[in-house]
Image (cartoon, rainbow, N blue to C red):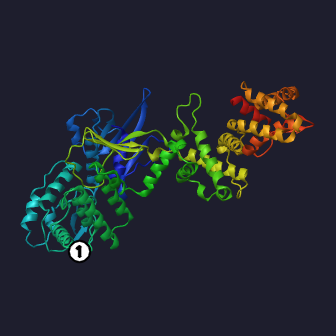
Amino acid sequence: MRLQDLIDYAASRYHIYEEYRWKDFPDFSVFVYGKSNKWLALLMRSYQDGERVECCDLRCGKDILNTKRSYISMPYRMKGDNWVGIRFNEETEDKLIFDLFDKAVKDLKPYTYTIILDNSNKLKEKFEETKPLRFSNSFFIHNDKVPAKIEEMRKMYRFGNGFYEDKAFNFVSQGRFMEDYEDNEFWDKELKIYFPSYHDLSIRQLRGYFSWRTSYRKGEFRKTNITFIYLYIYELLNGIGANAIEDRLRKITEFAKIYKEQGLLDDYHLRNIRRWCFELSLINDLPKAIVTSYLDPLILEKDHALSVLKKSELYSDEEVFEALSLYATHKLKNSPILKRNKEAAYKLFADLWKKLNEKAGNVKENFFERCFGQFMTFRFYPLGNAIYYQQANRDGFVYELSDNIGYSCKDKKWYRHGYNEQLFDKRKFDEVMHEADRYLRNYLKAGRPLKEKAEEKWVDVYLQRVIEDYEESLKPKIVIDMSSLDKIRHDASLTRDSLLVEEEAEEVISEAENIKEETSMDIHMEILKDLLEGKDVDQKLKDSHLMPEIVADQINETAYETIGDMIVECEDNTLKIVEDYKDEILKLLEGL
């Protein structure tokens, strides 16, 4: 187990994030619980004999020291009876560490009371963190008789170590027992409990919850508190009140819609519900169309953009530009170069990205990997921020959501495979996008110029190459259709026939037959090659019984169809190449 696994777990389950509080000690950080500002853990990294060492002090009590595990010891830095030290290595058991962290969080929750009598003998209620007088929930219950079903449910509670798995097991066991229970004792007060379970509620609150649930199931959508709402969703997630996975998802979705309209579910709660539906459908192997329907559309859009940028050669210039725009902090879609010449903008940005991704020499990673990292494997905790008891063994489970996102389960541990957005090098990516926009604005003479930044100048080398290739692509291409040469010969014969006097007819016919018999090499190609090499072609024309002006017309007629201009001129019965197209003709002949 790595220290990062604990950091991910704290963020995923409790929204507790690592805090760096000492500028001079960047390898030290802490977990702090809520507004109490109490420390949960001190996280430490160091190097010993060239190897990285990760450890932490955790405020979970010292009972765990009795298990005599090699990676658990007395605290490294902290003092007090509540702290133990944990070293992260291949022996460290992640499930145990997560349970210890759950216990640390639970121990810091302010749920105890102290009753203080002042001189006037009046009761006062005061929160006190240390040495409280504890009372069971029965101290505060209503005087009414406790329903037998509720009383029996409470007796079912199994006291364990207080870890998450115990809480989830108790919740599901009690929930199935109370699945069809109905009540009519409403309790309409505000109540807010994190990760609520039946065990956290008083008798009055329990009766209030089951009464509200009864009315909801009968189609009466009474307003209630967020704790009751979460309890009901937890029930559905665990198959209490619904069996098939599709039925659970349908009921959760309908429920969320109703209480969103009542204003009781804000965006935060709705994001949680979507996440739970996604993870529930995923780990139960539902079709991809159902699983992805619960994802934020932006996640799917970014996933597709990653596929485009990873294999940009398979996509159009516009698709590559759209993908770049999605990840760019710089707003590319607002750039004036799109108004100036949209097609040019698409091509130049796409070609730049492709040019950057060309590996050269001993470079181990292309620019995509430089910006977005490697395809990696991370621990995954499905429904980790809800109360959910996973009963089925999913070992061997594999689910490929896309080319960039996959999930699997091995040895009862869940994993996510893909790219981690927290590790993206957005600074390097934005350097390219900003400098490309600035450079291309100048090149296309579009909009106001952007400020030049010295750290972005390295991109200019690639931009220059892209522009050179772009300008080369705009030049007309010389293509000579070799299949039209027979037609050229035939037309040449007809032209000569119309120009020669009757006495010369027999001689011309003989010359035409000689032309047809020539098979070694097309005379026009020989003439073009000789002209390029600066040779005199007059004798060759005479020997072949060809007229310079007719040969020039025939060659230019073919060339004009492809490049729109003449490539051979005839002055004073002398042929010569048009200098502007000399290089293009040479490349063409070299390829034949």
Name the quarter where the N terminus is drawn. Answer: top left
Q: Residue furthest right?
A: 572
Q: Amino acid at mark 1?
A: Asp
- Residue 491 % position (x, y): 77, 40
> How packed is label 1: few (under 14 Cα within 10 Å), some, or many (20 or more)?
some
Residue indicated by mark 1: 188
The answer to whether residue 374 of the structure is visible from this angle is yes
Q: Residue at x 80, y 29 (%)?
A: 510
- Residue 394 % position (x, y): 24, 43
Residue 418, by quadrant, is: top left
Q: Is residue 114 above or below residue 527?
A: below
Instruction: Tell me: 171 left or right of 194.
Output: left
Name the quarter where the C terminus is drawn. Answer: top right
Residue at disc 1, secondary structure = loop
Between 69 and 332, which is closer to the camera in this rendering? 332
Q: Is residue 201 above or below residue 322?
A: below
Between 461 and 171, which is closer to the camera in this rendering? 461
Residue 498, by quadrant, is: top right
Between 227 and 20, which is closer to the camera in this rendering? 227
